[in-house]
Amino acid sequence: MDFAHGGSAHKRFHAFWGMTGQMCESNNGFLALAQDRPLAARGFTLIELLIAMVLLALLIAIALNSMGRARDQVYVAAVQTDLRNLVTAQENFFAGSDELVDGPRYSDSLEELNFQPSRGVEMQISVEGTGWTARARHVNRRTRRCAVFVGGVDAFWPAQDEGVIACGDAEDY
């Protein structure tokens, strides 16, 4: 056979037994591959199906992990937003309370501040002397806590710098 010039004058058929037990023919002089077989004889092997299933499971695991992290970020963002809004509410209350007999003060009550945390956010406020501190967490992410403080007060963990909201995992505390 002359492969370089397209073969000899006689027909070049090569036969082999396919996976189905039926004889498949190829007229190119080489072994017939699965894609050379007729459409009715084609199919996926078990290993091809298993590989496809493993790849699909891997993609689903990656997607679920990403969604879980995104959901946690949303919970922490809600807590941080509520703490920022609480700082504003406390400063407005402090500025409005300077006409009181006792002088200006911070509130130790969310109701007195007329402040409603976001759904699922739990908050705690503590007022000491000339300052206050607050901590918050989301009910769906209980191990992650955020805190802030203003003035001379023993701050809730993990707050370290005045007026700056800090977050940390409760296992680190």
Image (cartoon, rainbow, N blue to C red):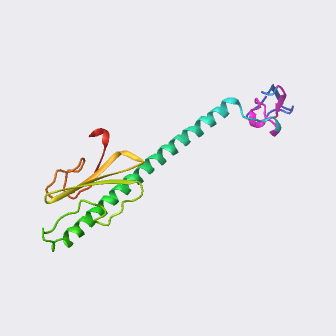
| Depth check, front residue: 13 or 128 | 128
Q: Describe residue 79's horizontal placement relative to residue 150 as left or right.
A: right
Give the magenta range.
Answer: 21-39
| Depth check, front residue: 125 or 167 | 125
Q: Is residue 104 above or below residue 1?
A: below
* Residue at the far bottom in the pictured view: 99
Q: Describe residue 79's horizontal placement relative to residue 101 as left or right.
A: right
Instruction: Say which quarter of the image contains residue 80.
Output: bottom left
Q: Is residue 160 above or below residue 4?
A: below
Residue 151 on image: x %, y %:
15, 59
Q: Describe residue 160's horizontal placement relative to residue 60 as left or right.
A: left
Residue 111 on image: x %, y %:
31, 63
Q: Is residue 150 visible?
A: no
* Residue at the far right in the pictured view: 10
Q: Is residue 33 magenta?
A: yes
Q: Is residue 83 visible?
A: yes
Q: Is residue 35 above or below residue 140?
A: above
Residue 89 on image: x %, y %:
27, 66
Quadrant placement of the C terminus: top left
Residue in view at x 42 percent, y 48 percent? 140
| Depth check, front residue: 102 or 33 | 102
Q: Is residue 59 above or below residue 8?
A: below
Residue 76 on image: x %, y %:
37, 52
Quadrant placement of the N terminus: top right
Q: Describe residue 47's horizontal placement relative to residue 108 as left or right.
A: right
